[in-house]
Amino acid sequence: MSTTQAVPQREDTAIQGELYMSFELGDKSWKVTTSDGHRGPSRYNVGAGDTAAVADCIRKARERCQLGPRVHSCYEAGRDGWWLHRWLIEQGVDNIVVDSSSIEVNRHARRAKTDRIDGDKLLAMLLRHHRGERVWSVVHEPTPEDEDARRTHRELARLTQERTST
């Protein structure tokens, strides 16, 4: 018995006039994948941390799809922390930070692993999430104080490792 529910893929299943985007965050560059749920995805490469380039991607995608102001985005929780989430919220973007271990994968088959494929998969899952499916676990934003407290511990561990390595 399968626990996955099938959702009909008709024209009216996507919410009209909204932009969806996913981020694949790397050390040196980010892959931004955008779509309105009807057209094929657009992909942009921006420098890591370049918020002006991200804002430009949003503008270009809105123009391409002739969309209104609603933007939904997601990315996997990771080393970048929460500053991007907070910046996106300030820009009026409805952002979700996803627990990477909750993303579904086919465990019986070898799968290709590229940023493009991962970005497309995140975008497809974001669309499914907004259609009402339960596809992943959302990580809740810690307070800035909690995040800073974790960083102190990480910095201490890094310094200890640096000191003991020869």
Image (spheres, rainbow, N blue to C red):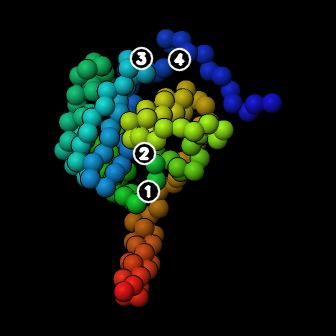
Mark 1 or mark 3, earlier in chain: 3
Distance from the alpha carbon under mark 4 to that under mark 1: 31 Å
Q: Are marks 2 and 3 in contact (CB under 8 Å)?
A: no
Please give the residue where the numbered disc 2 appears in the rendered image: 75
Give the percent coordinates (x, y) of residue 45: 26, 39
Dot 2, crowdedness within 10 Å: few (<14), some or many (≥20)? Answer: many
Q: How many marks?
A: 4
| Quarter residue 149 falls in | bottom left
| Amino acid identity at mark 4 | Thr
Give the percent coordinates (x, y) of residue 54: 25, 41
Q: Secondary structure at mark 4?
A: helix
Please give the residue where the numbered disc 4 appears in the rendered image: 13
Please give the residue where the numbered disc 3 appears in the rendered image: 38
- Point 39% across, 31% down: residue: 20
Q: Quadrant of the C terminus?
A: bottom left
Q: Are marks 1 and 2 in contact (CB under 8 Å)?
A: yes
| Amino acid identity at mark 3 | His
Front-most of residues 33 and 15: 33
Q: Quadrant of the N terminus?
A: top right
Mark 4 or mark 1, earlier in chain: 4
Q: Is residue 86 left or right of residue 124?
A: left
Give the percent coordinates (x, y) of residue 113: 46, 41
Mark 2 or mark 4, earlier in chain: 4
Dot 3, crowdedness within 10 Å: few (<14), some or many (≥20)? Answer: some
Please give the residue where the numbered disc 1 appears in the rendered image: 78
